[in-house]
Structure formats: C-alpha cells, structure tokens
Amino acid sequence: MQTEPSARPRGLFEYDPEELADKLVEMGGRPFHAKVLRRDVVAKGLLTPDSLTSLPAALRAKLPEELPLLVGRELDRTESRDGTIKLLTGFDRDGRRDNAIETVYMPSRKADQGKGATICVSTQAGCPVGCPFCASGLNGLLRNLQAHEIVEQFVRARALGPISRCVVMGIGEPLLNFDALQRALEIVRGGLELGARKITVSTVGFPERVRRAAQADPRFDLAISLHTPFQEQRDELVPAMRGVPIEEVLLAGDYWFESTGREVTYEYVLLGGDNDTPEHAGNLIDRLQGRRATVNLIPYNPSPELPYRRPNPQAVEAFRAHLESAGLVATVRWSRGLEDSAACGQLRAQGAGA
Ligand code: SAH
Ligand code: SF4
C-alpha cells in the first residue's frame, strides 16, 4: 500500500530552544513562552492545550495545528497488578508508520509512599548488542531514537503521575545513542527535578564510550552490565563486545569513578546454572576487589523463546552472600511488572505496523 507523505507539523520537542522561541513569536506569542511551555509540559505532564494556563489563550488554541505537544501515538498500555504501567508508543517518520517503543512507569512501593515513580526509558528501537538472554535485542537494531522521542517518553510517563527516578534501562544500548540521550536529559531536567543520583544509565560498557561519557558532564549514575567474570562467557553473553577484555571494561569503570566521583554499579543477570556458580562468585570477587563499586544482581526474567532459567531465591541469596562475605556491596533487583513483560529484558521493540 502506498503511504502518504507526512503532513504533520513539527512537535514541541523537535525544536531546539532558539527555534522554539522564534516559532512562538511567529504564532503571536513571546520568546519567553518557549521556556514556560516546555517546563509546564515536562514538569507537570500537562498534555492538553487548555491546561497550559500560563500561556495566553490565543496561543494555546493554535498549538494542536501548529505545534503539537506530542508526536507519537499511544498504541498500547498494560497495567500489572503491582501498579506498573507499560506504554507502547508509535512514532511515524516521513509519513510512514515506524517502530513502536516501550516505556515503563513503576509507582513507588508502599515503604516509599509519597515518593514519585521510577520510569524506565528506551534509547533505541531494538538493540544491536544481541545479548542472548534479552528480548529487546532479538531482532537487532531497528534505529536510534531521536532526542524528542526520548523526551516524549518522560512526558507521557509524567502524565501518569509524579516521577522521582529514571533508569535508562529500556530497549537499546544508551551509549550507542549518547548525543540524543544527553540532549533529551537536558530538556527533561529543565522541568523534572532529577539530580545526578536520580538518573541511572545502564550500558554494556564499551570502554571508549564510557570514557567519553565520563568527560561529557554526565549528570547521571552509570551501571555497567558485566554478567560474568569469565572472558569466554562474556563474549557469548554480550556478543557486540566480543574481544573486548573484561579488564578494559573495568578500567573504563575506574576511569568513570575517578573523573566523576560517582561509583559504578555492575549489573549481573543471574542465569540459573549458567553464571551463578560459586566459581563465578569467586572470580567476580577477584575482579572487583579493591574497586569502589556495587554489584546489582538481576535474577533472569524469562521470555518464552529464550533458553535460560530463572535461579531460585536461595541460589540468588547464596550468590549475594558470597560476594558480601568478601566485602563487596551486593544488592538484588527482583524485577517488577513481570507478569506483563514489563521487566528488564522483556521489553520489545515492535516493527512497522505493530
Ligand atoms: N542495553 C543496556 C541497558 C538496557 S538492559 C544494558 O544492557 O545494560 C538493562 C538491564 O537489563 C541490563 O543489565 C540487562 O543485562 C538486563 N537484562 C536484559 N535481559 C534481561 C532478562 N531477561 N532478565 C533480567 N535482566 C535482563
Ligand atoms: Fe541490548 Fe541491553 Fe538487551 Fe543486551 S541486555 S540486548 S545490550 S538491551
């Protein structure tokens, strides 16, 4: 079927700040309206022109036709019993239906009542890294998200409720789309009060990219997905990093700590029977001893098409205790939203027409 060329106007977050001021002047507004508008949308999740009462009514009325606040379409929304909401958003490009990407909104648990939610955002449609335990990479990379598409995930999540933390752990490898991510975070910070400790970016740890990120005024914490202390096994579990020595990854993590003053978290997906043996724990201890770092253990979240097993809670606890007995700090992340495939590694980019 022939697709129509896109006639849609550019969206609010597709403009850079100066351009946006010009656009608003052209629409009869004032330059300062640019900042007010962006802030109100990001900070308050106000998505209808009528609710943007800090703008003149005449200007508001023109927004839908001339400057839409959002450009994606919500394709699906699923809510788990624990309150986790998964949003599937579709973006059109050049008039064609394009990939759908996922964003997860996790309200605070009872113990943290009063705090806002944690959101998990995606940076790519699909992922080129190809970790065999992760559903996000099954079809490879479809494309990088643009900065405004990353911002839009925050805005859509903010419309669901307050946000107090963000993990960049959705679909994709953030350091392979770093410029767009940095631009998006800059816009988001103009509205949401997310300090450096409130944003965590998770990467497989390409050493050069970690170093470059460390130098780029990264106002976020870094998590590096390690998954095993054994080189051969890492080459299998993180295929795009085949041949990059684990020690190089750890040295890049050290560099991050030295340049930013913030400790790295090493993530470790626990695959029952594959990387959760005492030998693995012992070698991980050897690798990390003397380094200022935390290990975050993530029990594998199953996907039907993948051949791995979720370890039982005793095995997870034994692994954690082994690390702690050697003086490492180790935490366990039992994922939320499991039953609706909104957990780590279960997010899926959907192709055109999804
Ligand atoms: N691409 C980045 C960030 C997204 S994945 C990265 O890999 O770090 C976020 C985290 O979820 C990573 O630590 C990843 O290893 C983990 N993950 C992927 N698939 C998983 C699964 N099936 N079960 C549990 N964790 C998984
Ligand atoms: Fe990509 Fe991360 Fe999934 Fe690996 S775990 S395929 S890097 S999203």
Image (tube, rainbow, N blue to C red):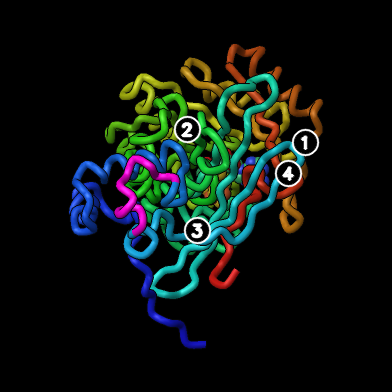
In-front residue for pair 65/220: 65
Residue 311 got which mark? 1
On the question of residue 234 being in view, the answer is: no
Q: How packed is label 3: few (under 14 Cα within 10 Å), some, or many (20 or more)?
A: many
CB atoms at circles 2 and 4 under 8 Å apart? no
Q: How packed is label 4: few (under 14 Cα within 10 Å), some, or many (20 or more)?
A: some
Please provide percent x and percent y for residue 42.
41, 41
- Determine the secondary structure under disc 4: loop
Say which of marks 2 and 4 sits in front: 4
Image position of 267 (left or right of 275): left
Disc 2/disc 3 C-alpha distance (Å): 19 Å
Above-or-below relation of 178 to 2: above
Where is mark 2, residue-wise?
200
Could you tell which of marks 1 and 3 lies nearer the N-terminus? 3
Task: Write the residue at 21% across / 55% down.
Answer: 28
- Determine the secondary structure under disc 2: strand
Q: Residue furthest front?
A: 57
Could you tell which of marks 2 and 4 lies nearer the N-terminus? 4
Residue 125 got which mark? 3
Disc 2/disc 1 C-alpha distance (Å): 25 Å
Q: For residue 183, what is the image quadrant?
A: top left
Q: Which residues are magenta?
A: 51-61
The residue type indicated by label 2 comes to Thr
Disc 3/disc 4 C-alpha distance (Å): 23 Å
The image shows a total of numbered marks equal to: 4
Where is mark 4, residue-wise?
80
The residue type indicated by label 1 comes to Pro
